[in-house]
Image: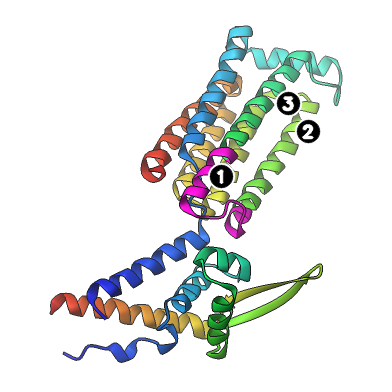
């Protein structure tokens, strides 16, 4: 039987991206700093992965100002949620097939 | 990718989803202590004024209050009860904040983050509504319904806050709601229902949370 590695979404190959997506699927929206605290990554690292997900149109970026500071929050698009679910299904399928083998 | 790697990946997703949407640093020990404070407060009241346990007590308090007229200050005894309840409340909240803060440090979850803010907000709306309603009832000397109302609004607060922490809190809220409704049906036994709801239930649920998640 052919193992469906090709069903895994390339956009989620990086663990940080997968974790970002997990958070945004579980919550309506999440802001940059809370995301940074939760995932324990650097500003630059997080920003570049967020940019990557935005390019895929998996997440939506809302920039707002609270006083002078920017408060950027992110939410998952329906396209992103669908892709995330597909990726999880592929992971689950891989595990069950490797168990059989 | 190997099987264990895949499973790690799935486990990390599940963990992140839970940590990002639920306040998992709630301390069970603080629940137990809140129950103990409530029992201590009730003990002081019963020791000083044992006749308050009698079901007729509430109506005599009410008659006494009514004599002063609508909106007059509640009698000295009622004010004392309010003070004791406030002291118990402040002690319980302070303990909860202190122990949850310690727990949050241990679990690496921010104490004051997106999730704890959502938790507090959903706790505060029903709780403040109930608090103000009870103050109004005290002003109008409707003492009979106060214990039931406090249990019911506390139950609603826990029920809505339960969405942002362990599901057990939701069930505790349901138990408090049920107890509050029963208390409304038996108006003379408010003190007993308070002992059950704020004392005994807190200790049972605190112990449950402690055994399940704290260690």
Q: Is residue B54 visible?
A: no
Q: Is residue A16 visible?
A: yes
Residue A87 in the image: state x and y as whole percent.
Answer: 38, 82
What residue lies at 20% left-to-right and 91% top-to-bottom?
A2
Q: Check disc 3: other Cα within 10 Å, few if <14, some if 14-19, many if 20+.
A: some
Residue B207 in the image: state x and y as whole percent.
Answer: 41, 35
How far apart in space, not on screen, are marks 2 and 1 (Cα)? 34 Å
What is the chain identity of the residue bearing mark 2? B
Q: Which label was assigned to residue B136? A: 2
In the rendered structure, does residue B102 fall within the stretch colored magenta?
yes
Tell whether B54 sits left or right of B11: right
What is the chain identity of the residue bearing mark 1? B
Is residue B98 depicted above or below A21 in this figure? above
- Mark 2 or mark 3: name the one nearer the start of the chain: 2
Quadrant for the N terminus of chain B, please. bottom left
Q: Depth-wise, is mark 3 or mark 1 nearer the camera? A: 1
Residue, disc 3: B142
Q: Depth-wise, is mark 2 or mark 1 nearer the camera? A: 1
Q: Check disc 2: other Cα within 10 Å, few if <14, some if 14-19, many if 20+.
A: few
What residue lies at 45% left-to-right and 36% top-to-bottom?
B206
Q: The magenta stretch spans which residues?
A: B97-118
Residue, disc 1: B101
Q: Observer-nearest residue: B114 or B86?
A: B114
Quadrant for the C terminus of chain B, please. top left
What is the chain identity of the residue bearing mark 3? B
How far apart in space, not on screen, are marks 3 and 1 (Cα)? 38 Å
Is residue A38 depicted above or below A45 in this figure? above
Q: Check disc 1: other Cα within 10 Å, few if <14, some if 14-19, many if 20+.
A: some
Residue B37 in the image: state x and y as whole percent.
Answer: 56, 24
| Count of numbered circles on the image | 3
């Amino acid at each position: 039987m052919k193992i469906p590695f090709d069903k895994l979404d390339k956009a989620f190959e990086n663990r940080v991206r997968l974790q970002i997506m997990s958070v945004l699927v579980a919550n309506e929206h999440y802001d940059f700093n809370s995301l940074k605290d939760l995932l324990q990554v650097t500003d630059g690292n997080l920003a570049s992965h967020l940019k990557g997900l935005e390019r895929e149109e998996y997440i939506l970026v809302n920039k707002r100002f609270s006083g002078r500071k920017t408060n950027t929050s992110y939410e998952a698009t329906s396209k992103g949620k669908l892709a995330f679910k597909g990726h999880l299904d592929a992971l689950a399928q891989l595990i069950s097939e490797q168990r059989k083998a | 990718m190997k099987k264990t790697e895949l499973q790690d990946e799935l486990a990390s997703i599940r963990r992140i989803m839970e940590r990002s949407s639920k306040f998992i640093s709630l301390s069970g020990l603080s629940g137990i202590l809140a129950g103990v404070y409530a029992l201590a407060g009730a003990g002081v009241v019963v020791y000083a004024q044992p006749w308050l346990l009698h079901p007729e007590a509430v109506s005599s308090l009410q008659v006494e209050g009514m004599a002063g007229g609508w909106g007059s200050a509640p009698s000295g005894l009622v004010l004392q009860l309010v003070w004791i309840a406030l002291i118990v409340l402040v002690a319980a909240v302070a303990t909860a904040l202190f122990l949850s803060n310690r727990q949050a440090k241990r679990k690496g979850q921010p104490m004051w983050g997106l999730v704890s803010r959502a938790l507090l907000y959903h706790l505060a709306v029903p709780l403040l509504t109930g608090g103000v309603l009870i103050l109004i009832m005290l002003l109008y000397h409707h003492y009979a319904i106060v214990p039931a109302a406090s249990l019911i609004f506390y139950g609603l607060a826990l029920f809505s806050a339960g969405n942002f922490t362990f599901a057990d809190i939701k069930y505790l809220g349901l138990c408090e709601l049920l107890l509050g409704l029963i208390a409304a049906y038996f108006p003379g036994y408010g003190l007993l229902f308070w002992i059950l709801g704020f004392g005994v239930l807190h200790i049972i649920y605190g112990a449950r949370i402690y055994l399940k998640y704290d260690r």
